[in-house]
Image (cartoon, grey):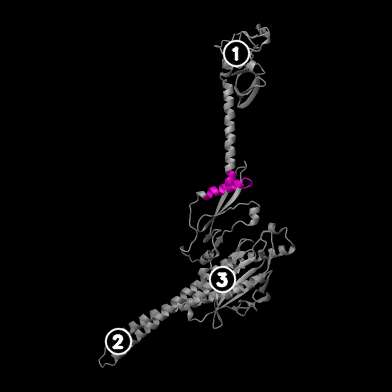
Amino acid sequence: VKIQRSNGMIQDASITELFTDKSCVRAEWLEDTVSKAKEIDIESLLLLNPNLAEKMPPSNLPRRNSRVPRRESVLPRNGIAKEIPRSTRSRTQATLEMQIMPNSRLSEVEPVMYKNISTGRKSVCVRETEKLKKQREDRRTQLQEIREKRGQDYDAGNPNWEFMKMITELRATLDSYQHLSDSDPIELHKICVCVRKRPLSKKEKAKREIDVITISSKNVVLVHEPKMKVDLTKYLDNQPFRFDYAFDDFVTNEEVYRFTAKPLVQTIFERGMATCFAYGQTGSGKTHTMGGNFSGKNQDCSKGIYAFATQDVFLLLEQPRYKDLNLKVSVSFFEIYSGKVFDLLNKKAKLRIMEDNKQQVQIVGLREQDVFSVDDVVMNIDMGNNYRTSGQTSANSNSSRSHAVFQIHLRRNDKLYGQFSLIDLAGNERGADTSSADRQTRMEGAEINKSLLALKEAPSKICDLHVDVSRILELEEQVVDEHREIQQKLLLWSDADDKLLKMTQLPDYNVENYTNILQTYIDERMEIFQDFNKNLKALRQALQREEQAAKTQG
């Protein structure tokens, strides 16, 4: 339509809204990419747009084919119509206003008026307005349905529900995989680092926190970090971390043991030393994994790595190759708390750590309890756990406040044959988590973190020592094999020498032939002994290097 602006200019505009109570419309137009609007009464609109009069509904304007006369009249009481002066009529009041009295002679006008009013068409403005209104109501209905559907799939009251939705959709796009099972092979590593996901705690669920960890494969963990852009758009920063093995939160302790500590049991039957650490934040499930499942504050010690390792030790003892070694099994259990050592199998007696004349660290007074079955081990673990120091922190109501070391010893003729150390470390803590704790808890946390910082040097040192030990084992095997071969060759050489000497007893033996054969024997044997001597010297040097490295690290 065309409208007249306040400055007198005629402007093309669009009608966006109709106000029937005020007999006006709302017109909008664009001016230099700026949207403007103005309310205009219908009478002024019809003056500039006379073609709209044909599109007005019959209730406001009679149709041209109507039999209603152009000049409006009012029927007085005596039934005679009286003309209304044109000056008193509005252009928008072009209807016939009649007062119908009983026995009126103009009764035929009534059906014509009724028909025109009831069957009249709506104007384009009204139809467009009603169409926009219907579309707006449909959109509102759709939005309401979407909100209700989201409320069913996600907790709409959770402030992090959008991040939860993003994580769920991301997990749906990941290729499905089978978690670690008994059919998967166990890979042997010098140092094996595994991670185990824990479920959300009751406290985290109460705070409506979300799960931001996804085990995407057998050795990869995805950490979803919720972030927000400058324009307040929410998104996820997905960081992958690779380990030797990754365990989901539904994996049992027995499955974790099979891929972590189980391969180390064989080591102690080969005169080796093995160590398994459980490291993590307070409340991450270290004691649950090492010691056994918890039911409230009660712990089932038969379902932890301590008991599983001991069970395999007794199974290996029954094998023929180890049964004749007459090995005896004993266990010890002690804790390190605030720099002090206490024996958990001897009523928490205080122990001393000293160095012997070989510069080896020894724990003076530590009790080693002989065990003959898995039940004996479980009983000792249960007794030791009762003496272990624990406390309450903001992250864990039953937090272990000390490092617990459970050791399985193999002895032969009262000499140490092999040793397996299973260590349940105290949980590391952030300063923010202990800021509201009492002084004792803060001091414990500082001591725990200090000892864990010292531990970070252990893997590299252990790796270096492992390289030396591996070289020693390789050389030892080679020297022993060569010695065994030389021993067998000595018998052959003895027979050859006897035949050669018998040849010299003949009166006409060939001296030149004798000397040539003897020289061949000596050259062959000298070459073998030189190689053997070379490998023997390399073994002795490796043993010396390993002893020096052990003293340095001790």
* Badge number at residue 514: 2
The three-letter amino acid code for the residue at tag 3 is Ala
Q: Magenta stretch: give its range.
A: 150-171
Tell me the residue that label 3 is attached to: 307
* Residue 164 lies in the magenta stretch: yes
**Residue 328 position (above or below residue 439):** below
The three-letter amino acid code for the residue at tag 2 is Tyr
Q: Nearer the viewer, residue 112 or 56?
A: 112
Q: Quadrant of the N terminus?
A: top right
Report how far apart the C-alphas of labels 2 and 3 lie in the structure: 70 Å
Q: What residue lies at 62% left-to-right and 45% top-to-bottom?
A: 156
Mark earlier in primary sequence (2, 3): 3
Residue 43 x %, y %: 64, 15
**Residue 512 position (above or below residue 76):** below
* Residue 380 lies in the magenta stretch: no
Residue 308 horizontal side relative to residue 72, left or right: left
Residue 49 x %, y %: 59, 15
Mark earlier in primary sequence (3, 1): 1
- Secondary structure mostly seen in magenta is helix
Q: Nearer the viewer, residue 273 or 24?
A: 24
Q: Nearer the viewer, residue 457 or 7?
A: 7
Instruction: Tell me if I can see residue 504 in this picture.
Output: yes
Q: What residue lies at 59% left-to-right and 25% top-to-bottom?
A: 129
Residue 442 horizontal side relative to residue 187, left or right: right
Mark earlier in primary sequence (2, 1): 1
Mark 2 lies on a secondary structure that is helix
Q: What residue lies at 64% left-to-right and 73% top-to-bottom?
A: 383
Instruction: Tell me if I can see residue 50 in this picture.
Output: no
Report how far apart the C-alphas of labels 3 and 1 lie in the structure: 103 Å
Crowding near pointer 3: few (<14 within 10 Å), some, many (20+)?
many
| Number of marks in picture | 3
Residue 243 x %, y %: 53, 60
